[in-house]
Image (spheres, coloured by chain):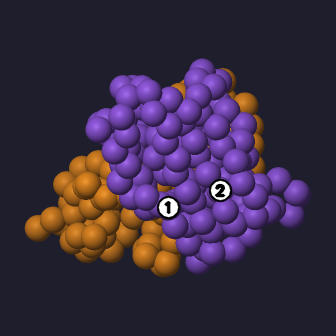
């Protein structure tokens, strides 16, 4: 399985951005998918996750109410709609796939989001 | 939220010597299904994290057997029996038992 993120870029505070993640290769059903971010020079932070069914989602306290995760299994795609962006959202955003529960098995290369005026 | 605490945060090791990293959880990582979803990752500079160990002690494909994981409940350890140059990087423990997933702060392993 290969994951490819896209949609990052430079955006002003308060604006929106939509990240996408396309899965290719062996795209069998997974358990869940996640977005994890890493601010420059910092550690890893879980941002949001969604089960394969799409019926359960989760968000970190820092993004809840501003970010929305979704997926389209027919298109093998994961999305993150990011609204009301803040400078502290600046990070490399990774798409992560759980092939089995709790695994975080597969990671993409990340897409960089910079929030700055 | 659940907190994972790694130690040490910096680990200089001589080539061929063993290394050990501890990861302590603020709550049990035993899932309702009986499994413990505690994983270990390494991140090299400029690269995405790569999983080395899953469910406490299972090595991923291609991971040398000098890497081993152990522990239970809330205390876990990653051990490298003999450190090699390619082992340099930042090591993270990651729990997938509870949502949200949690990450340790990271341990920087370098060669002394």
Instruction: Please indicate whether residue A1 sits to the left or right of residue B88 in the image.
Output: right
Query: Which residue is disc 2 drawn over?
Result: B76
- Between the residue at mark 2 and the residue at mark 1, the CA separation in whole angstroms equals 9 Å
- Tell me which numbered mark, 2 or 1, is placed earlier along the sequence: 1
**Residue B55 against residue A65 in the figure, above or below:** above
Identify the residue at horizontal 38%, vertical 49% (top origin).
Answer: B11
Q: Quadrant of the N terminus of chain A?
A: top right
**Residue B20 against residue A56 in the figure, above or below:** above
| Residue B100 visible in the picture | no
Say which element carries label 1.
strand
In this rendered view, identify the residue nearer to me: B105 or A106: B105
| Residue B77 visible in the picture | yes
> Which numbered disc covers residue B19?
none
Q: Which chain is purple?
A: B
Residue at mark 2 shares a chain with residue at mark 1: yes
For mark 1, name the chain: B
For mark 2, name the chain: B
Q: Which chain is orange?
A: A
Q: Quadrant of the C terminus of chain A?
A: bottom left
Identify the residue at horizontal 43%, vertical 58% (top origin).
Answer: B8
Instruction: Please indicate whether residue A26 sits to the left or right of residue A44 in the image.
Output: right
Query: Which residue is disc 1 drawn over?
Result: B6
Q: Horizontal and vertical percent for residue A75?
A: 60, 36
Identify the residue at horizontal 63%, vertical 75% (top origin).
Answer: B26
Q: Residue furthest right?
A: B33
In this rendered view, identify the residue nearer to me: B82 or A47: B82
Q: Horizontal and vertical percent for residue A102?
A: 70, 51
Q: Horizontal and vertical percent for residue B107?
A: 41, 52
């Amino acid at each position: 399985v290969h994951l490819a993120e896209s949609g990052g870029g430079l955006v002003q505070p308060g604006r929106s951005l939509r990240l996408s993640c396309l899965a290719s290769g062996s795209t069998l059903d997974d358990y869940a998918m996640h977005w994890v971010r890493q601010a420059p020079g910092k550690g890893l932070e879980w941002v949001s996750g969604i089960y394969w069914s799409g019926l359960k989602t989760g968000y970190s306290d820092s993004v809840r109410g501003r970010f929305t995760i979704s997926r389209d299994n027919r298109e093998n795609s994961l999305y993150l709609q990011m609204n009301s962006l803040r400078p502290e959202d600046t990070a490399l955003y990774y798409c992560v796939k759980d092939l089995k529960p709790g695994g975080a098995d597969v990671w993409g290369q990340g897409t960089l989001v910079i929030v700055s005026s | 939220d659940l907190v994972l605490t790694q130690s040490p945060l910096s680990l200089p090791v001589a080539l061929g010597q063993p290394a050990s990293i501890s990861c302590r959880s603020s709550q049990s990582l035993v899932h309702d299904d009986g499994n413990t979803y505690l994983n270990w990752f390494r991140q090299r500079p400029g690269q995405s994290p790569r999983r080395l160990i899953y469910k406490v002690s299972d090595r991923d494909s291609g991971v040398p057997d000098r890497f081993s994981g152990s522990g239970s409940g809330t205390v876990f350890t990653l051990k490298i029996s003999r450190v090699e140059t390619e082992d340099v990087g930042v090591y993270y423990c990651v729990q997938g038992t509870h949502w949200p997933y949690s990450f340790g702060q990271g341990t920087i392993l370098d060669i002394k």
